[in-house]
Amino acid sequence: MQLPFARLMHRWIWRNPHRRAHKLLRFAETEADGGRDLVRAAERTADPLLRRLYLTHADDEQRHANLFRHRGIALLRALPASPSKNFQANWFAPGERGLDDLRVEREPDEALLAFLHLSEKAAAQRFALYRDVLANDPPTRELFAEVLHDETFHMRYTLSQLGRLSPERRQWLLWRARLGRLWKGYLRIAVGLADVLGTVFLIIQYFVFLPPFALLAKRAARREKPGWRLISDKRNGLLNREY
């Protein structure tokens, strides 16, 4: 259940058509990257049923990437050029995280399924919210509704296959995957915060600390006499000999 504030915030984020188009293009990149990861997962698994499901999932992700890309390009072509870069609000309205840079070749099927289930569940919740706030853009709203149908299937098959492969450890694997996602989320927030703080400190240095030094340099320059000043060393007679 989404809070009213979250719904209002996402309605504001998606109201801007330029931001909407760029977010769709970003979603396309994420979906395509997730599809490539799933192909690698299908290549390494020894379970024939999982291999078929992974390949079906990868095909869905590529199709989603194409849908997002085509819709984003169509929006951009219908809009005038934006004079400035719009605030994308990626932290508030992310797309699907996919495998989130998970090393597929190093993870057993059970751990991969747990991570995929949580990722697809989070994506389904976000896409449902995006669909609900896009009443003013029916084509994009229908796009999210179509993608949401596939995300629901992905969420269900990953959970059922996790129960088939590891029924006793299913809850533990899900909790471990949740902790991993929380840690990755913390790292993303920490990196973003460090970037913001670095920008703030640079601005403070430029507008607070640098002006006094510039003023002192100007004062020192005004005290300097104009023209070249030659300093002769009479003791060594540097100006009276060639070398």
Image (spheres, rainbow, N blue to C red):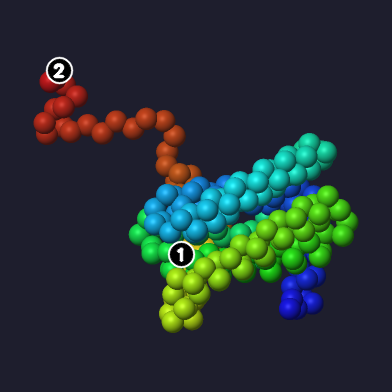
Q: Nearer the viewer, residue 48 or 145?
A: 48
Q: Nearer the viewer, residue 226 or 58?
A: 58
Residue 45, by quadrant, is bottom left
Q: Nearer the viewer, residue 33 or 183?
A: 33
Against 203, is 67 above or below? above
Question: Could you tell me residue 66's position as x and y percent?
Answer: 67, 43
Point 83% across, 50% down: residue: 139
Question: Could you tell me residue 48's position as x and y percent?
Answer: 46, 56
Against 33, is 190 above or below? below
Decide if residue 133 is on the left or right side of residue 114. right
Mark 1 secondary-structure assignment: helix
Considering every residue shown, the one lying at the far front of the view is: 48
Disc 2 to disc 1, how far (Cα)?
Answer: 80 Å
Residue that mark 1 sits on: 112
Point 54% across, 56% down: residue: 53
Against 240, is 169 above or below? below
Mark 2 secondary-structure assignment: loop
Quarter of the figure that contains the N terminus: bottom right
Question: Could you tell me residue 133's position as x and y percent?
Answer: 81, 64
Q: Earlier in the sequence, mark 2 or mark 1?
A: 1
Residue 69, by quadrant, is top right
Decide if residue 167 is on the left or right side of residue 157. left
Can residue 108 be spotted in the picture?
yes
Residue that mark 2 sits on: 242
Point 44% across, 75% down: residue: 166
Q: Nearer the viewer, residue 234 or 162?
A: 162
Question: Could you tell me residue 227's position as x and y percent?
Answer: 41, 30
- Please give the count of numbered marks on the rendered protein: 2
Q: Are marks 2 and 1 in contact (CB under 8 Å)?
A: no
Q: Which amino acid, mark 2?
A: Glu
Q: Which amino acid, mark 1?
A: Leu
Say few, some or many: other residues with alpha carbon within 10 Å of mark 2 (under 14 / 14 to 19 / 20 or more). Answer: few
